[in-house]
Image (tube, rainbow, N blue to C red):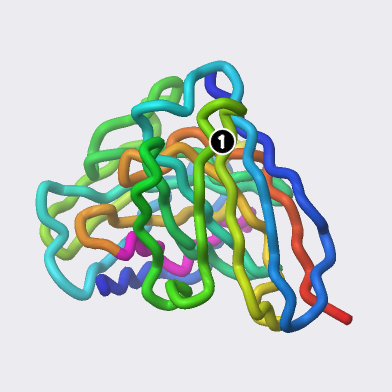
Amino acid sequence: EIVLTQSPGTLSLSPGERATLSCRASQSVSRNNLVWYQQKPGQAPRLLIYGASNRATGIPDRFSGSGSGTDFTLTVSRLEPEDFAVYYCQQYDTSPWTFGQGTKVEIK
Amino acid sequence: QVQLQESGPGLVKPSETLSLTCTVSGGSISNNYWSWIRQPPGKGLEWVGSVYSSGTTNYNPSLKSRVTMSVDTSKNQFSLKLNSVTAADTAVYYCARSSGYFLYWGQGTLVTASS
């Protein structure tokens, strides 16, 4: 199975700062079949990015995704208070679909 | 807007079978893939498996020997059965509509495996 490793585990930033989250795959994820989710406490994950770089409907343009192959990045250009949450990457290129372990973005 | 709602017992005894149902509203269950994802308390997400509206299934190999998923198109529902549960199966179980990734999610239901 494809193992996704996210880094860092925790990111401590202030509102207005830029957040850069990494997701590295153990083998190439073809066709950029990788997505990013945001999860807040007590809530289901929310899809942010699909196809590695496409924003889902209603997602603000401060969220962007990039990368290909084995290295992918989620960037939040300027953190808003509501962006402090846990972020997961997920690949849907090869079954079983797998998730990264998550990156927590916390207020510094 | 598609909405999903999980239902089922919140407590299951070890060695018994966990059974959950997901009711889909705001859209048809037909011609779509439907999935279960679980999240142990304080931990990350794990895909359990998927079922197509025709009944074709795809399970996570780590759970395949214990999982059964099915669809009831007449009720717009799909279900999960996980047998021989242990404490390690304690988690919030989410149902979701899938296209490989998961756009629509239920709110999740906590299932605790304990005597």
Task: Looking at the picture, tell me which residue is in the foreground, A47 or B78.
Answer: B78
What is the three-letter code of the residue carrying label 1?
A: Glu
Residue range (magenta) = A96-108
Residue B61 rendering spot, x and y as whole percentages = 37, 74
In the rendered image, the quadrant that contains the N terminus of chain B is top right
- Residue A11 in view, yes or no: no
Mark 1 residue crowding within 10 angstroms, few (<14) / some (14–19) / many (20+): some
In the rendered image, the quadrant that contains the C terminus of chain B is bottom right
Task: Looking at the picture, tell me which residue is in the foreground, B23 or A43.
Answer: B23
Vertical arrangement, residue A102 with respect to residue B88, above or below: above
Residue B38 rendering spot, x and y as whole percentages = 58, 61
Under tag 1, what secondary structure?
A: loop
Residue B72 rendering spot, x and y as whole percentages = 54, 36
Residue drawn at the location 56% of the way across and 26% of the way down: B74
Q: Is residue A49 left or right of residue B36?
A: left
Q: Residue furthest right?
A: B115
Task: Looking at the picture, tell me which residue is in the foreground, A67 or B12.
Answer: B12
The residue that label 1 is drawn on is A80
Give the quadrant of residue B52. Answer: top left
